[in-house]
Image (cartoon, grey):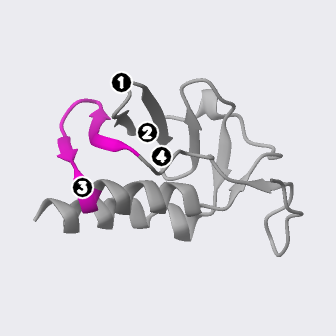
Amino acid sequence: MTFSGCGKDKGDQTSLSLEKDGIVNIKVSSFPGEYNHSFSEDDADIIVDYLSGLKLISDFAEDPDVYAGMTWEISIEYENGDIVTVYYFGNMFIRTDSGPWYKMNYDEAKRFDTFLYELGE
């Protein structure tokens, strides 16, 4: 489903369309590789709800390939054995392993670090 952009962000807004049912485990690691987290049950649901709720911009001027920064690799494992990997780059860009890059709203994006900290306690 696509919505028209509004406010300062221009371009179409979309979502990642992640399946929320049947999640077994979510592994979150960083590149460079300093951080490794694993979540299941309610904590995994919180992460997928967050990722699915992001308002993503599909039409943007920036080129993710010219940026540098930390990347979170988020691997979502389902009961049927499927694994969907999400790449969350520099609090600015996000994509699934088989999808295009999207730009994130910065205020929404920066909450991910807070989620990881709070869920990891």
- Counting residues from the start of the chain, the first of labels 1 and 2 encountered is 2
Q: Position of residue 112 (x, y in %)?
A: 39, 60
What residue is shown with label 4? 90
Residue 13: x and y in percent read 78, 57
Per the rendering, the mark at residue 81 is 1
**Rendered view: 115 above or below 57:** below
Q: Count the marks: how many?
A: 4
What stretch of residues is rendered in magenta? 22-43
Marks 1, 2: nearer the viewer: 1
Contact check, label 4 and label 2, Cβ < 8 Å = yes
Q: Tag 3 or tag 2, which sits nearer the N-term? A: 3
Q: Give the distance between the C-alpha atoms of the residues marked 1 and 4, in whole angstroms.
A: 29 Å
Q: At 67% across and 62% down in the image, what residue appears?
A: 55
Label 1 vs label 3: CA separation? Answer: 16 Å
The magenta stretch spans residue 99: no
Q: Nearer the viewer, residue 70 or 86?
A: 86
Q: Mark 4 belongs to which amino acid?
A: Gly
**The residue positioned farthest toward the left in the image shown:** 121
Q: Earlier in the sequence, mark 4 or mark 2?
A: 2
Residue 36 location, quadrant: top left
Where disc 2 sits, the SS reads loop
Instruction: Name which of mark 4 and mark 3 comes first in the sequence.
Output: 3
Q: Which residue is mark 3?
A: 41
Dot 2 amino acid type: Gly
Q: Is residue 40 above or below residue 109?
A: above
Name the kind of residue labelled 1 in the image: Gly
| Mark 3 surroundings: few (<14), some (14-19) or many (≥20) residues within 10 A | few
Amino acid on which disc 3 is placed: Glu
Disc 2 designates what residue? 69
Circle nearer the viewer, 1 or 4: 1
Q: Earlier in the sequence, mark 1 or mark 3?
A: 3
CA distance separating discs 4 and 3: 27 Å
